[in-house]
Image (tube, rainbow, N blue to C red):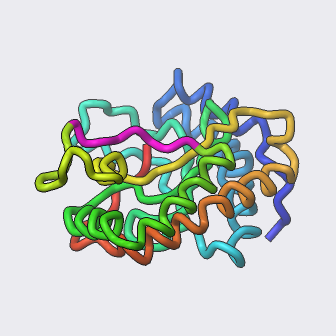
């Protein structure tokens, strides 16, 4: 495989144009741009990260419109996931907004949620908190997807109430379209972001574990 040399700006431009031309006709006419400017660089990037983080799954560019009122056929981004456990792993995405990198635990089953709460309510939280702090110090932002109230049976004065109210533990950074996007610096940025997430992802894999059933949904 050709070594990674950056994400070309034509990838961003592709999604800018797709936003106003989301049709099968337009896609067919521009599929070569998608293959060469979006998918190929992403494959190269992930190939260079595989030895450290594992093999990635590149999501299909097609939307599942069967149960959606929104019938545009193509996604407005191209994402890829290195899955460590069900709905737990490292994520990277290219869109009209540029480069987006993140990871963590993004789609909970009831069993995963209970495991997470049990771990937060145990000595394991002493490992979780510094792992989370490391990711935040690296510039990642924590999602604000919280329960409106506290979990049943949890007292108002619980020392980790905010953590127990979490529906997921998803962190991300939107890099946008910096001057280095079309250079190998992109590889360095994705690698360093994922490394900052590694202690947290490993904790989640150990303590949250697999879903009880079903297939994890793709992050938006």
Q: Residue at x 80, y 41 (%)?
A: 181
The picture places residue 164, in percent across and down from the top left corner, at 30, 53
Locate residue 193, reporting x and y percent: 68, 55
Residue plotted at (12% across, 52% down)? 152
The answer to whether 218 appears left or right of 92 in the picture is left
Instruction: Point out the residue furthest to the left here.
Output: 152
Q: Residue 27: where, in percent of width, then height?
A: 55, 38
How would you classify the magenta stretch by its main secondary structure? loop
* Left or right of residue 156, residue 39 in this image: right
Q: Is residue 58 visible?
A: no
Q: Residue at x 62, y 26 (%)?
A: 16
Question: Quadrant where the N terminus lies?
Answer: bottom right
Could you say which is closer to the camera, residue 17 or residue 182?
Answer: 182
Q: Is residue 88 magenta?
A: no
Q: Residue furthest top?
A: 20
Q: Would you say 100 lies left or right of 108 here?
A: right
Q: Residue at x 65, y 53 (%)?
A: 39
Whether 143 is among the magenta residues is: yes
Q: Considering depth in this image, is 30 or 49 the residue closer to the camera? A: 49
Q: Residues in magenta?
A: 141-148
Residue 67 visible in the displayed image: yes
Left or right, 100 with respect to 180, comes to left
Above or below, 126 relative to 67: below
Rendered-image quadrant of the C terminus = top left
Is 83 in front, or is 137?
137
């Amino acid at each position: 495989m050709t070594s990674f040399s950056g994400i070309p700006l034509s990838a961003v431009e592709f999604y800018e144009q797709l936003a106003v031309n989301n049709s099968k006709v337009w896609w067919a006419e521009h599929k070569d741009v998608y293959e060469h400017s979006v998918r190929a660089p992403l494959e190269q990037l992930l190939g260079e990260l595989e030895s450290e983080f594992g093999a990635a799954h590149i999501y299909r560019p097609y939307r599942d419109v069967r149960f959606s009122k929104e019938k545009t056929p193509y996604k407005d981004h191209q994402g890829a996931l290195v899955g460590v456990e069900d709905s737990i792993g490292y994520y990277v995405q290219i869109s009209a907004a540029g480069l987006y990198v993140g990871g963590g635990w993004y789609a909970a089953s009831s069993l995963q949620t209970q495991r997470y709460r049990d771990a937060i309510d145990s000595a394991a939280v002493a490992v979780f908190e510094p792992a989370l702090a490391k990711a935040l110090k690296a510039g990642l932002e924590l999602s604000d997807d919280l329960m409106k109230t506290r979990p049943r049976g949890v007292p108002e004065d619980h020392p980790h109430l905010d953590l127990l109210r979490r529906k997921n533990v998803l962190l991300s950074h939107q890099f946008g379209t910096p001057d280095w996007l079309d250079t190998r610096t992109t590889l360095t940025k994705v690698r360093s972001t994922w490394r900052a997430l590694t202690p947290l992802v490993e904790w989640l894999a150990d303590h949250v574990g697999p879903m009880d059933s079903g297939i994890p949904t793709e992050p938006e």
